[in-house]
């Protein structure tokens, strides 16, 4: 039902069968989508561009978590802490060593990957509830580190960051910073798509599907589980660094356990084991609070507002909406938005036939 390959299109090699964009229509849609995104700063205001920037930065970090959870079958409840470590690392590198911001961002990703490997090494021999508790411990350890390491994070006061620049041209406005985030999104998502086509990517999926069979086939479980933590942390570090230089300020309180749950929500809502689903889940999570806020404003002063006192509890409504969305997706759409998008494409491809 979800195969969009036209009739008569036969694949004669494994490389052709695993291509990222298998049809002419998908390639045309790719170029059309890129053209629309490149024109976005010309037609959208700064507020909408800021939302798109948040989708990009959170989508990169969510993709890393999806590689860990969706493709490798691990679990992490401390992803926000690695996201924050990347944010603080980039700001610290720029302020302490004077490195250009554009260089600090990938270096911050590498530093976060090393920290992820440190926590992933013992966690690689755990599974299930024990692994969840281990990653939860990583969340609390890094949170405490952020609060105490004033030389690195600025302590509870936080740390100011600067906008990146290309020569004398500063990317300090949403219109210009959007293109930087778009470039990183393209690079990171293409890299993840190609990773899944390699031997290591297939090994990660094998560990998820049946770790005993994978071990019998000669796959080193500890190595690939640890590797998945490193990759997930690298993506979190890149996303966190972009997030920090967009806001130009990072605070310790921002990277708490609730933020980690939101990252898990992005992966679940977008679709486990789906690269594009990670971006869909991030877009859903960014748009959901805006929709809740708009609904609260529309109901303000009405009978429902007087009965529930929505005006003074909008923050709680946002948290409730996130929890409700995760539960509803787990019940009615467990494969996420990516699966629903495939079904919609298959419907229009096969209409009016039902097979």
Image: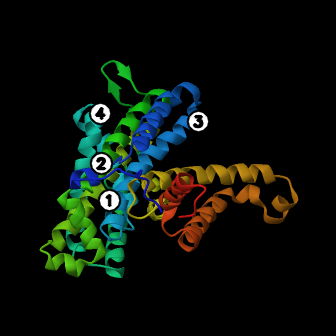
| Distance between mark 4 and mark 2 Cα atoms | 19 Å
Residue 150 appears anywhere in the view: no
User: Which mark is nearer the camera, 2 or 3?
Assistant: 3
Q: Tell me the distance, in whole angstroms, between the alpha carbons under discs 1 and 3.
A: 33 Å
Residue plotted at (36% across, 51% down): 8
What distance separates the C-alpha of mark 1 from that of mark 2? 9 Å
How far from the left and from the top, in percent, is residue 246? 44, 37
Q: Earlier in the sequence, mark 1 or mark 2?
A: 1
Locate residue 347, reporting x and y percent: 56, 57
**Residue on which disc 3 sits:** 47
Residue at which label 1 appears: 145
Mark 2 and mark 1 in contact (Cβ < 8 Å)?
Answer: yes
- Residue at x-position 42% and y-position 35%: 31
Q: Secondary structure at mark 1?
A: helix
| Residue occupied by mark 2 | 152
Rendered image: mark on residue 102: 4
């Amino acid at each position: 039902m979800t195969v969009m390959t036209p009739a008569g299109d036969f694949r004669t090699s494994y490389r052709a069968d695993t291509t990222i964009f298998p049809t002419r229509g998908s390639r045309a849609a790719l170029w059309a989508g890129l053209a629309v995104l490149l024109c976005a700063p010309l037609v959208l205001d700064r507020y909408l561009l800021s939302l798109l920037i948040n989708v990009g930065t959170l989508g990169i970090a969510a993709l890393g978590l999806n590689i860990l959870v969706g493709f490798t079958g691990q679990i992490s409840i401390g992803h926000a802490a690695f996201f924050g470590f990347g944010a603080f690392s980039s700001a610290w590198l720029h302020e302490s060593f004077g490195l250009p911001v554009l260089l600090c961002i990938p270096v911050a990703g590498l530093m976060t990957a090393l920290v992820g490997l440190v926590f992933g090494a013992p966690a690689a021999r755990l599974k299930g509830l024990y692994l969840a508790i281990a990653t939860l411990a990583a969340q609390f350890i890094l949170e405490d580190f952020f609060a105490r390491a004033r030389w690195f994070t600025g302590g509870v006061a936080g740390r100011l960051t600067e906008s990146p620049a290309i020569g004398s041209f500063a990317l300090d406005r949403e219109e210009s910073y959007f293109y930087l985030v778009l470039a990183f999104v393209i690079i990171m998502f293409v890299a993840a798509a190609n990773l899944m086509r390699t031997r290591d990517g297939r090994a990660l999926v094998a560990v998820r599907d049946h770790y005993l069979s994978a071990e019998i086939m000669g796959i080193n479980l500890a190595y690939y589980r640890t590797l998945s933590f490193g990759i997930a942390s690298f993506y979190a570090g890149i996303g966190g660094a972009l997030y920090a230089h967009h806001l130009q300020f990072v605070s310790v309180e921002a990277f708490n356990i609730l933020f980690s749950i939101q990252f898990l929500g992005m992966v679940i809502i977008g679709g486990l084991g789906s690269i594009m689903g990670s971006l869909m889940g991030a877009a859903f999570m960014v748009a959901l609070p805006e929709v809740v806020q708009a609904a609260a404003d529309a109901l303000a002063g009405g009978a429902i507002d007087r009965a529930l006192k929505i005006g003074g509890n909008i923050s709680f409504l946002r948290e409730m909406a996130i929890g409700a969305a995760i539960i509803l997706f787990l019940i009615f759409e467990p494969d996420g938005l990516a699966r629903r998008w495939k079904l919609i494409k298959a419907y229009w491809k096969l209409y009016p036939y039902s097979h």
